[in-house]
Amino acid sequence: MKTDKNLTISDVRVSVSCPGRNFVTVKIVTECGIYGVGDATVNGREMAVATYLQDHVAPCLIGRDAHQIEDIWQYLYKGVYWRKGPINMASIGGVDMALWDIKGKAAGLPVYELLGGRSRKAVGVYAHATGNTVDDTLDRAAALLEQGFKAVRLQTAVPGLDGSYGVLGDKKDYFQLQNDRPLPPELPWSTRKYMNSIEELFVEARARFGKEVELLHDVHSRLTPIEAARLGKMLEPFDLLFLEDAVAAENQDSYRIVRDHTTTPLAIGEIYNTIWDCKDMIQNQWIDYIRTAATHAGGITALRRIADFAALFHVRTAPHGAPDLSPICHAAQAHVDLWAPNFGIQEYVGFGTDASNEVFSYDMSVKEGMIHVGDSPGLGVDFDEDAAAKYPYNRSYLPVTRLEDGTLWSW
Ligand code: GCO
Ligand code: MG
């Protein structure tokens, strides 16, 4: 029996707030009163996606049946004519999450049940340890392992490069790291200094923690393919779970070179917008983990499609989980993670701060290095518009990186 609830979309509201970080939140309301929420945040370009949603997408949604998630996805993707792109795909991602939330609430079922049910009891995660020195980084990692985490991403400052990526500096936590930067900060980079210092971090980590713990590392797209190949070989003895974003990959073919030279597992995808961006990587088996995010790749509908495609090629999922994704995205990903037969691991740096917890609520908790998802209908999240209004948008940018001679590089 089809539900008699009237799920005709009657209102679409877009909010940009900064409870510690800037978040773009879309709320879709239906005639019967059931509503759903989605995350459409694009770090550093928040107002563009908010305007895009408000002025261009919202009018096209009013009057549609919220049950028709696939048709609305296709309507927004093909109907825009221009296709792809971070702003477009994040807006589709936000709408898609809200529609899955509505469908779950209407059915009285959590979204993971709609996807096909749990494939596992909980979602395994990796946490972040970053520090100014190797010892500092490893002390932070030790504290995380003490809390029950089984996998840790290690980043340490590169000696001689002040403020290199991954280091907290005077910021207390990762949430603050990228906030309150009215203009992009400029940070230095030297591949030689990095390559000369990185091995020690993993030598010391294995010496201190042994072989059981899973270790990861993010290169943030700063190497060329042959440099990444050398790094992968250098790190082979330390048996990483994966090496992330070793090379910028607009040209997916570049990964073939890395792959040909090293058995260190490779992961990519946090800035990818569509399945097309990862198609060659996956079907040629150049990577081991695909890291597309629910917000940036076009929602739950898109993540499900990417996961199924990746499964054919032994590629596992490892969604991006940075703090510039709101708890709504984290929840959407946790539901997909719980279902995906080829789920690998979820990046986790916390779901929020005291301020963002005033604005977002979620039915998820972390114990022993795993996200446990509750059985609330839909995504199990909520967004308090009044609380959000207390935290107005605060323009902030990601950093840029320059080589020591001033050449602009990948951050
Ligand atoms: C990660 C990421 C982040 C991104 C940030 C961009 O792996 O967590 O690389 O730190 O830089 O999310 O907005
Ligand atoms: Mg990353």
Image (cartoon, grey):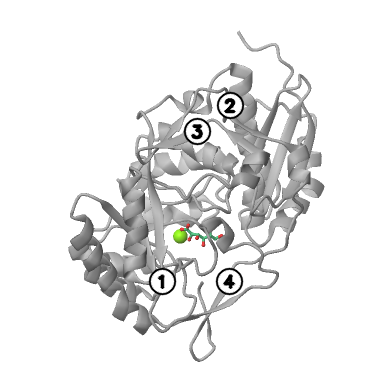
Q: Earlier in the sequence, mark 1 or mark 2?
A: 1
Please give the residue where the numbered disc 3 appears in the rendered image. Answer: 364
The kind of residue on which mark 1 rests is: Asn
The kind of residue on which mark 3 rests is: Met
Residue 278 left/right relative to 79: left
Q: What element carries label 2?
A: loop
The kind of residue on which mark 2 rests is: Gly
Please give the residue where the numbered disc 4 appears in the rendered image. Answer: 399
Viewer-closest of 260 and 402 = 402
Q: Which residue is drawn at the image coordinates 58% and 45% (left, top)?
A: 298
Give how far apart the Cα atoms at labels 3 and 4 are: 31 Å
Q: Are marks 3 and 2 in contact (CB under 8 Å)?
A: no
Give how far apart the Cα atoms at labels 1 and 2 are: 41 Å
The kind of residue on which mark 4 rests is: Pro
Q: What is the residue that sits farthest to the top in this orientation? A: 1
Q: Is residue 74 visible?
A: no
Q: Earlier in the sequence, mark 1 or mark 3?
A: 1
Please give the residue where the numbered disc 2 appears in the rendered image. Answer: 378
Give how far apart the Cα atoms at labels 1 and 4 are: 18 Å
Q: Is mark 1 on a helix, strand or loop?
A: loop
Q: Is the distance from the Cβ of mark 3 to the nearest ligand 1 atom less than 8 Å?
A: no
Q: Where is residue 314 in the image (x, y as percent from the top left)?
A: 30, 45
> Which one is closest to the eye, mark 3 or mark 2?
3
Q: Which of marks 4 and 2 is nearer the N terminus?
A: 2
Picture disc at residue 132: 1
Instruction: Classify mark 2: residues with Cα within 10 Å, few (<14), some (14-19) or many (20+).
Output: many
Viewer-closest of 202 and 123 = 202
Give how far apart the Cα atoms at labels 1 and 3 are: 32 Å
- In the displayed structure, 409 sits above or below 322; it is below
Q: Are marks 1 and 2 in contact (CB under 8 Å)?
A: no
- In the displayed structure, 103 sits above or below 39; it is above
